[in-house]
Every structure is written in structure tokens, then in C-alpha cells.
Amino acid sequence: MYDKLFTSESVGAGHPDKICDQISDTILDLVLKQDENARVAIEVMASNRLIIIGGELTTTGYVDIVSAAWEVLEVIGYSENDFTIISNVNSQSSDINQGVDHKDGFTGAGDQGIMFGYATDETPEMMPLPITLAHALALRAEKLRKNKKFKWAKADLKTQVTIDYSNKNPKINTILMSVQHQENYNQKEFFDFIKNEIIHVVSKKYNMNDDFKIIINPTGKFTIGGPIGDAGLTGRKIIVDTYGGMGRHGGGAFSGKDYTKVDRSGAYAARWIAKHIVSAKLAKRAEVQLSYGIGIAKPISIAIETFKTNQVSEEKIQKIVEELFDLSVDGIIKSLNLKKPIYKQISVFGHFGRNDLDLPWEKIDKEKLKKMKKIIE
């Protein structure tokens, strides 16, 4: 696929940007539990000991915004003495609302924009190998921290995996982990635990080589983390959320947005289609681009890219995609059951390739798959 090094990163639940994403999606889920037709676009900014929650919310239900934020912060490991929280949330613009909840009965896109979905046969998750390994490292570190087995570890962390694609079988070239820790700790014991209980466990799980370079906390110390160490914003980790840079990104963030925002729902639909293309063996890699206009129900354009791995023409693949998948906003919402409060669980460790979760855009429709396979018979 490549003849060079390629690197992807992931971050932990205590990363400042991910704290903001989790607060945004927690509020979204709490609203959707009461009102599945709510319109939500919540943005969070965290800096030092101040957290500001803004955006738009139109609902028949009620959510205590500040309490919702504390729900996230307490799980991560913070207390009420750590932050001041300010909420400044308004209702959705009537100009936008009239285009979304259209007078003719259909749902229009909540904004214009382009979305990409990607899939590859490189891993069982149908995700690129670098981001798959980066997420696996972050997930294992978080699980061990939560289980009190990761001594001295705190919530903020970053992982980075470099894969060497120059040979037939890709190899790990470098793994970098930066993990926040308590002030008084045993560095050697801490580093040995990361190497033996996280890095090598994950590399073995994916049957990777063990002769790679390992870098841990390269500055030598990482005690100040989260928003106290660096400002955080909702939607700033969009490459971590998607394909680690290997698949393109339209630019729109996901967290805090309801299903009428095609930045989110369109990207989920594009991933769903790409997975079907690869599962049907129409191509080894597939990237799907969708574009929408605000207030318009159906996509303005659909484009398929298979990177010369296709078994049939891209024109044939696009034709069957257009036949089998309803890509109107209402069609996506119905097909993927997006009115359910399922978003908090994916606000960290990636929105795609999550075999540990029951996500509708990761499921393969057997009937659609059968029809897609027929075009190469």
C-alpha cells in the first residue's frame, strides 16, 4: 500500500480536547434520552481551571448542563475543587431550523459540507493499522488505570504509532507513549509497566514484530495534564476520531452535534458504505465522499475512490451504492438509528472500527452485501 513510514496518534480520556468532546456528547445523550427530536450543537472550551460550555440547544426536555459536565469530570478523576464551569447555551437559529425541519415534511441537512468515509482490509476492524494500534494502546492504558493496576498513572495520555510499509508485511517502526503521572513515582517501574503491560501486549495481540523503537515520556516528566496543562476544545481531535490521517477528512467535527448535522451523520454513512464495499471484496480499500447543502435533503454529490484496488469499475461501485443506500438525511437517520443516545461512548478512542461497541455504522447489512457481491460474479 505504501513504501514509507506512516504515523497515527490517539489520546486518552483525560486529554483536554477529549474532556471537551466527552462533555459535549454527554449533554447530547442526556437530551436525546428525553427528546429524540432535539436539535443540539454543544461546544466546550477548557483552559486552566475554567470550563465554558456554549452552543445551541432546542428541546422539550431539560438537562442541567453544569451537572452533566461534572458527570464526565468525576469519572475522569477530577473533583469539584478543580474547575469553575460556566454555561452559555442558546436555542438554534430559526434561519437554520426552517431548513432542517422543512415545511414539506423532510429533514434538511443542518449545514453544507463534505464528509469522507474510509475502510481497508488491513485489519479486522477494517481500519488503517497505525490508528488501530494507537487506539488499542490508549484503550488498554485507560482500562488498567481504571482498574487501579496502572500505578501512578493519571488520565491524560497520548499514543503514537509509526508503521513501516516498505516490506510486504507492515512492521511497527516506533511506538511513542506520553502518560501523565503522579509527582512522586518510580520512573523505571512506571516505564517498565508501560512497555511490558501495554505496548508489548498490544503488539502481540495484533501479531506484530517486537523489534521496534519505544519512546516513553520524552520530556522526562509529565505531571501537569488535562486543561490545567493545555487548553482544550470540542472537535479538535478530528483525525484521532476518524482514520489517523490515512483517509481524508472533510473538516467537520462530530461531538456535541445531533444527527441532522451531516458533519456527523454523513461521515457515519460514508464509513458504513466504505465497509460494505470492502466487505463485498469490490475493493481492498475504499473512500467515499458525500457533499450536502444546508436545508437540502439529499447529497449534492457522491464520489468513490478505491486507490486502484478495485475488482470492478468505480462507476459500477458508485451505481450500486446509489441504488442500495438512501443517503438523504432522513434515510441516514433511519438506516443507522441515529436518534438513540449512543454518542458519549464514542467521544474518546475513535468513532470507527470500535468492535468493542454496538455501533450501527459498523454493522454489515447482509442483504446489501449480497447484492453488492453480485456485480463481480
Image: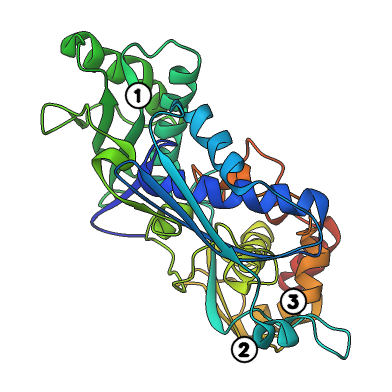
Give the residue drawn at x 43%, y 69%: 248
State which tag comes first along the sequence, 3 or 1.
1
Q: Nearer the viewer, mark 2 or mark 1?
A: 1
Give the quarter of the image for residue 92.
bottom right
Q: Residues within 10 Å of mark 3 (few under 14, many from 20)?
A: many
Kind of residue at disc 1 = Lys
* Place of residue 14 in the rendered image (x, y in percent of width and height, measured from the top left): 40, 36
Judge by depth and name the residue closer to the eye, 352 or 100. Answer: 100
Q: Quadrant of the N terminus?
A: bottom left
Question: In the rendered structure, which amino acid carries the disc numbered 2?
Answer: Gly
Judging by the rendered image, the residue that carries numbered circle 3 is 329
Q: CA distance from mark 2 to mark 1?
A: 43 Å
Residue 293, numbered circle: 2
Give me the residue at 66% from left, 57% from top.
279
Say which mark, if any, is on residue 282. none
155 relative to 264, above or below: above
Sequence order check: which comes first, mark 3 or mark 2?
A: 2
Which residue lies most toward the right here?
Answer: 105
Above or below residue 332? Residue 320 is below
Relative to residue 351, is residue 295 drawn left or right?
Answer: right
**Residue that label 1 marks:** 154
What is the secondary structure assignment of the residue under circle 2?
loop
The x and y percentages for residue 323 are 80, 80
